[in-house]
């Protein structure tokens, strides 16, 4: 089993965003593996003072005590203008680990689309890099069965800005807009017509 986990944390002009949500998820992974030594992640972060950066923080639970490493990458947003629907009833990615082989295999099947939208047991889950939400003309709905419960998704749920519900693949036609969310893009509403977004 892969025991190297990660947090992707946004930093802009030296300021780190929403670290408490990353800390909470990190601690939940430690608890799952019975690790009692908890580190303060913010002590490991010292991002560049100019520009937006993706802070990739990894921690290896195969070692005791576990080691935390941080790498900084200048952030360049990847434009997502189309998603390919792909079905996989066996995929698992409930913990944010460095072992992304299953996700990478699906992403490789995207064809001419920018990314994939993964359907598991006929229900909408996530794209390869983001949680997703749909607008039903009243409120934003995010799948109740994501592959990974992202930190941005969790924050927006707590703030009452999005609501979770099981979304069957046949229900996609009922929505008017799509938004993607993760730590780097926050809540990114896609302006493209939803009918033209899926390929």
Image (spheres, grey):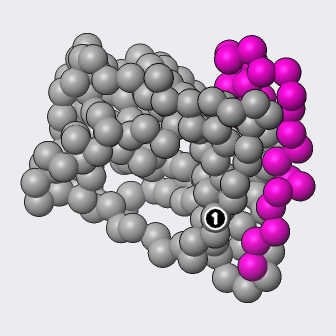
Q: Position of residue 183 (x, y in %)?
A: 61, 52
Q: Residues within 10 Å of mark 1 (few under 14, many from 20)?
A: some
Identify the residue under disc 1.
71
Q: Which residues are magenta?
A: 25-48
Q: Residue at x 68, y 17 (%)?
A: 33
Q: Does the stretch in magenta take in 43?
A: yes
**Count of numbered labels shown in the rendering:** 1
Look at the picture and state if 93 lies above or below 9. above
Q: Residue at x 73, y 25 (%)?
A: 30
Q: Residue furthest front?
A: 64
Q: Residue at x 56, y 30 (%)?
A: 3
Look at the picture and state if 67 lies above or below 33. below
Horizontal arrangement in the rendering, residue 163 relative to residue 194 (left or right): right
**Is residue 48 something that shows in the picture?**
yes
Horizontal arrangement in the rendering, residue 69 relative to residue 197 (left or right): right
Q: Position of residue 116 (x, y in %)?
A: 25, 45
Look at the picture and state if 183 lies above or below 167. below
Look at the picture and state if 128 lies above or below 90. below
Horizontal arrangement in the rendering, residue 141 relative to residue 177 (left or right): right
Q: Residue furthest bottom?
A: 50
Q: Position of residue 55 (x, y in %)?
A: 65, 62
Viewer-closest of 192 and 114: 114
**Is residue 141 something that shows in the picture?**
no
The answer to which quarter of the image holds residue 95 is: top right
Q: Does the stretch in magenta take in 143?
A: no
Q: Residue at x 80, y 61 (%)?
A: 45
Q: Position of residue 32 (x, y in %)?
A: 68, 16
Tell me the SS state at disc 1: strand
Horizontal arrangement in the rendering, residue 55 relative to residue 47 (left or right): left
């Amino acid at each position: 089993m892969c025991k190297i986990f990660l947090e992707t944390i946004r930093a802009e002009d030296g300021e780190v965003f929403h670290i408490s949500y990353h800390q909470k998820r990190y601690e939940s992974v430690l608890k799952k593996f019975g690790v009692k030594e908890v580190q303060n992640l913010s002590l490991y972060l010292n991002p560049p003072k100019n520009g937006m950066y993706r802070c990739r923080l990894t921690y290896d639970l195969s070692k005791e005590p576990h080691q935390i490493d941080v790498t900084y990458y200048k952030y360049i947003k990847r434009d997502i203008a189309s998603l390919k629907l792909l079905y996989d009833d066996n995929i698992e990615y409930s913990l944010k680990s460095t072992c992304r082989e299953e996700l990478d295999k699906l992403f490789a099947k995207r064809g001419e689309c920018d990314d994939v939208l993964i359907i598991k047991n006929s229900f909408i889950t996530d794209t390869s890099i983001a949680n997703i939400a749909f607008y039903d003309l009243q409120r934003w709905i995010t799948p109740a069965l994501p592959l990974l419960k992202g930190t941005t998704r969790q924050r927006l749920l707590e703030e009452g800005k999005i609501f979770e519900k099981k979304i069957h693949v046949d229900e996609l036609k009922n929505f008017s807009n799509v938004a993607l969310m993760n730590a780097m893009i926050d809540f990114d509403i896609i302006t493209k017509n939803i009918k033209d977004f899926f390929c």
